[in-house]
Each structure stands twice: as structure tokens, then as C-alpha cells.
Image (tube, grey):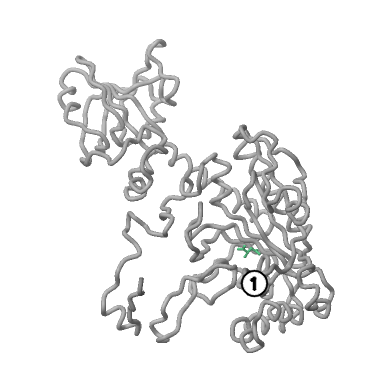
């Protein structure tokens, strides 16, 4: 018999059906045994009486079973309003064990916050059966699907960019990958597709987006992951206003369609100058909610007019506040002088939501002289600029449209929308704070042969 999902039993009262899933729970009441059967759609109460009770006696938590039986309407007084299928139950007639299971390492009926997180990560495949994580991944899928549809309708093209690439500065350390065919050389994994998306603008794409993994080898700090997902966008022939407008409309529509229970505190999103935000809130990602106890309140705000450069710690050097490709608010390179470096503003913008930075971007410098000057301020010699970014300068010699874009951190956005305390709860297979995958046991050793092939030697760090 064809298997149906447990929630489909609602339309099958009086019929014989087959369902399959995991034993979520078993209750023995003497003459009758109940099993809650869980599948991807929900949970269904299955009733075992007479002979079949003996079979039910063997079944244990998380065994995978198939049950054929008759769907019965429950009497009014026996309905369970907490279950979607609470108005029906299945009277079991046949049971088949599809696979046995060890006792699960932790309980699955709870929301799981009380379980040691390392345990959950080690057995993530079990943890994922939890209704809360099922909901999170399904809503994550809906959000990604919405974004793809929305941007496609606006004529954006999703383009995949390389994972094996060259360093692009986003302010973090690169993950590097040895290149076997060019011994001694390394690829960098992308901290973002920043340069590729700009090169796509030179390539005439005009409206690009990508739901993309970014990799940044940062020291463990708070709620971060070395690999995370961005909605990455770039547009040609636009000004700051166009980028803000696009993202603002996208988020307002997304909340309306997928999270109707949420209330956006203010539209259009309020805008704050960076300097004013720092002065007033001592933060460039202020939480502007009126009522922080209310989980359905969304306070979006744009932070604009960031400084182009900021002093790097200690050495009297300058860093780009966003990244070097950001356009300073100047007309020509001569306007950048030693004296005014700290005062120059940039066409940079961040979107904050309830105290989290959920997107950041900028209009880009497409004039080579200004770009070169920016790199100089950041302490690069002419030779270094050529080595590291020569490809971009060269591309800009072949007709570059004015362009700009933004990238939005999807994990953070989802954590806020799903009222989750951290981004690991909205990712299928997150890593620990010190970047280990406890389930796969990665990173792990490689063989001597692999190292030899790559011409690499491991030197133990002195403690
Ligand atoms: N590449 C930038 C980032 O990852 C975003 C952007 O400027 O578009 O933060």
C-alpha cells in the first residue's frame, strides 16, 4: 500500500492507510498501547489493541516503523488540540520494523535548549528530528525560496562564483587551500564574492544576486560561524538610494508574506547617520525596539554615512571601515589628504534589526585613481596593489559601469525572525565556537601521502 504522511490521515477517516516514521513516544495503558508516530509532516497517535499489543511491546523510541491500519475519528472528549492530527488516530492492523535504533542520546519531545549543545551537535541528525529544528529548516527554505523568486521577478540573475579563489579583504583571516598542481601556491576561500560580483558588473550582468557561503577564519567570538550564508547583491548604474530601496522593499514583503505575526515598527525604515548612532546609542547597531519583551516586534533601521577609514589598533595605520572597494564621498583622489583621512565619509550602509547588523554594503569606487589612493592609505605599496588587485584595475580599464551592492547575513536574519537565541539553531550542521564539526570529526589529520603530494610539512607549534 502506498505510504501517506501522518497529516494526510485527516482526510482518510474510515479508510485503511499505511504510514511510516519514527516512534516518538509509547504509552502502555494495560489493554491498550499508544504510540506517537513522527514523520516529516507531524505526529499521529497509533492505537494497538489485542494481538498487536504484543508487537507494540517490542517497539522502542526512535525505531523506524511502518504501520497499516484504519483511520478513526476520535470522540470529542479524546481530541488532542495540541496535535494537528489530534482529531483522529490510527487503529494499527499491521506493523513492520524498518530499522531499529539505539536509545537516542537526548530527549526529542522538548525544544532541546536544555540539552548540552556539544551532544546535540555530535548527533545532529537526531537533533534535527526535533520539531523546532524541523520548523527552522523549513522556514529557512521558504525564506531562501522567497528571495530567489522576488529577485528573479526584478530581473536579477543568480550567478555562482568560485570557491577556490584569491584573497578578498573583508577584514578577516582567509582559509587557504594548497594547490597541488602549482606546488607552494594556495587558493583562498572567499570571505565574500565581493570582487567577483564587481567583475560581473564589468561583464554586463547589471543585476546580480547569489545565496552564497562566505568563509572567514576568525577567532571564536560570540555567536559566529566560520562559514555562513549571505544574500549577496550587486547592481549597475545605481546610487545608494536604489540599493536601500530594493532591500527595504524585499524585507517588508518577506515579513508580510512569511511572518505575518511580526510587526515592523516603522516604515520606511528610519535612517541614522553613523556618527549620530554612536553618539546617541554608543553603537552602530542600536536596538530600536520600543518593547524588547515583545518577540514579534521588528525594528529595522539603516545606518548611513559611515567614515571611509578607521584607525587600526595601535600602529597608527588605517583600515577601511567596510572594505577598500567602497566609494568615499569625494569627487577626486586629491581630496584624500593625510590630514582629513579620518573625516572622509563613504557611501556605505548597514541594515540593523533589533540590535543586529543584518546587511551591509556600499556604492563602489569605479574610478581607478581613487581606488589606488584608497589602497595606498591602507598601507599597500604600488607593487602590492598590482599583485593583489591588478586584475580588478585591469578589468576597470575595459569599461566599468558605476555600481554598488549589499550583502545580507541570512543566518542572523533567520535567528531574529525565528526568535532563536543564536545562529546555530537555524543552520543544519553548525560548528562549535572553535570551529569543529563534532559529528564528522573535522578538521582531521591527513595522510603522509597527501602532505607529500602537496609538498607540505606539519611543524608543531611551540606552546
Ligand atoms: N562583501 C560585503 C560583505 O560581505 C558586502 C558588500 O559590500 O556588498 O560584507
What residue is disc 1 on?
A: 200
Q: Measured along the vertical axis of the image, is residue 242 above or below residue 160?
A: above
The image position of residue 32, as x and y in percent, is 23, 17
Q: Is residue 245 left or right of residue 24?
A: right
Quick one: 175 or 404, which is closer to the camera? 175
Q: Measured along the vertical axis of the image, is residue 393 above or below residue 254?
A: below
Q: Is residue 452 left or right of residue 355?
A: left
The image position of residue 431, as x and y in percent, is 41, 55
Q: Measured along the vertical axis of the image, is residue 330 above or below residue 45?
A: below
Residue 407 occupies which quadrant of the picture? bottom right
The image position of residue 209, as x and y in percent, is 62, 61
Q: Measured along the vertical axis of the image, is residue 411 above or below residue 238?
A: above
Quick one: 23 or 18, which is closer to the camera? 23
Residue 211 occupies which quadrant of the picture? bottom right
Residue name at image x 67 percent, y 77 percent: 378
Quarter of the figure that contains the C terminus: bottom left
Quick one: 377 or 2, which is closer to the camera? 377
Q: Is residue 76 left or right of residue 306?
A: left
Amino acid at each position: 500500500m502506498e505510504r501517506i504522511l501522518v497529516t494526510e490521515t485527516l482526510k482518510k477517516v474510515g479508510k485503511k492507510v499505511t504510514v511510516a516514521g519514527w516512534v516518538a513516544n509509547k504509552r502502555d495503558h494495560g489493554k491498550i498501547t499508544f504510540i506517537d508516530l513522527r514523520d516529516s509532516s507531524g505526529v499521529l497517535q497509533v492505537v494497538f489493541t489485542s494481538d498487536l499489543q504484543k508487537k507494540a511491546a517490542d517497539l522502542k523510541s526512535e525505531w523506524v516503523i511502518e504501520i497499516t491500519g484504519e483511520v478513526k475519528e476520535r470522540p470529542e472528549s479524546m481530541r488532542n488540540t495540541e496535535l494537528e492530527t489530534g482529531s483522529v488516530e490510527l487503529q494499527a492492523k499491521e506493523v513492520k520494523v524498518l530499522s531499529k535504533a539505539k536509545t537516542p542520546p537526548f530527549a526529542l519531545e522538548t525544544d532541546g535548549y536544555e540539552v548540552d549543545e556539544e551532544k546535540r551537535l555530535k548527533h545532529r541528525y537526531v537533533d534535527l528530528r526535533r520539531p523546532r529544528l524541523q520548523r527552522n529548516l523549513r522556514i529557512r527554505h521558504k525564506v531562501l525560496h522567497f528571495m530567489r523568486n522576488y529577485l528573479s521577478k526584478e530581473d536579477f540573475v543568480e550567478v555562482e562564483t568560485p570557491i577556490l579563489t584569491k584573497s578578498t579583504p573583508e577584514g578577516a583571516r582567509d582559509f587557504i587551500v594548497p594547490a597541488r598542481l602549482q606546488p607552494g601556491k594556495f587558493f583562498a576561500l572567499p570571505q565574500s564574492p565581493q570582487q567577483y560580483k564587481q567583475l560581473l558588473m564589468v561583464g554586463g550582468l547589471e543585476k546580480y544576486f547569489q545565496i552564497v557561503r562566505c568563509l572567514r577564519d576568525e577567532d571564536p567570538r560570540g555567536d559566529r560561524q566560520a562559514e555562513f550564508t549571505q544574500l549577496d547583491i550587486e547592481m549597475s548604474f545605481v546610487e545608494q538610494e536604489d540599493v536601500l530601496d530594493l532591500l527595504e522593499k524585499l524585507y517588508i514583503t518577506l515579513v508580510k508574506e512569511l511572518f505575518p505575526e511580526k510587526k515592523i515598527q516603522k516604515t520606511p525604515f528610519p535612517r541614522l547617520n553613523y556618527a549620530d548612532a554612536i553618539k546617541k546609542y554608543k553603537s552602530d547597531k542600536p536596538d530600536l525596539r520600543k518593547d524588547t519583551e515583545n518577540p514579534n516586534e521588528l525594528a529595522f533601521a539603516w545606518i548611513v554615512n559611515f567614515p571611509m577609514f578607521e584607525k587600526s589598533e595601535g600602529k597608527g595605520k588605517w583600515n577601511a571601515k567596510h572594505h577598500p572597494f567602497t566609494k568615499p564621498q569625494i569627487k577626486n583622489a586629491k581630496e584624500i589628504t593625510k590630514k582629513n583621512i579620518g573625516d572622509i565619509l563613504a557611501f556605505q550602509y548597514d541594515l540593523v534589526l533589533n540590535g543586529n547588523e543584518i546587511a551591509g554594503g556600499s556604492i563602489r569606487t569605479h574610478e581607478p585613481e581613487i581606488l589606488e589612493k584608497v589602497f595606498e592609505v591602507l598601507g599597500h605599496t604600488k607593487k602590492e596593489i598590482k599583485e593583489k588587485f591588478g586584475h580588478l584595475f585591469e578589468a576597470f580599464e575595459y569599461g566599468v559601469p558605476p555600481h554598488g551592492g549589499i550583502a545580507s547575513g541570512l543566518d542572523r536574519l533567520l535567528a531574529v525572525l525565528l526568535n532563536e537565541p543564536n545562529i546555530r539553531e537555524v543552520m543544519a550542521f553548525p560548528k562549535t565556537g572553535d570551529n569543529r564539526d563534532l559529528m564528522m570529526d573535522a578538521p582531521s589529520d591527513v595522510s603522509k601521502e597527501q602532505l607529500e603530494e602537496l609538498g607540505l610539512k606539519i611543524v608543531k607549534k611551540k606552546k
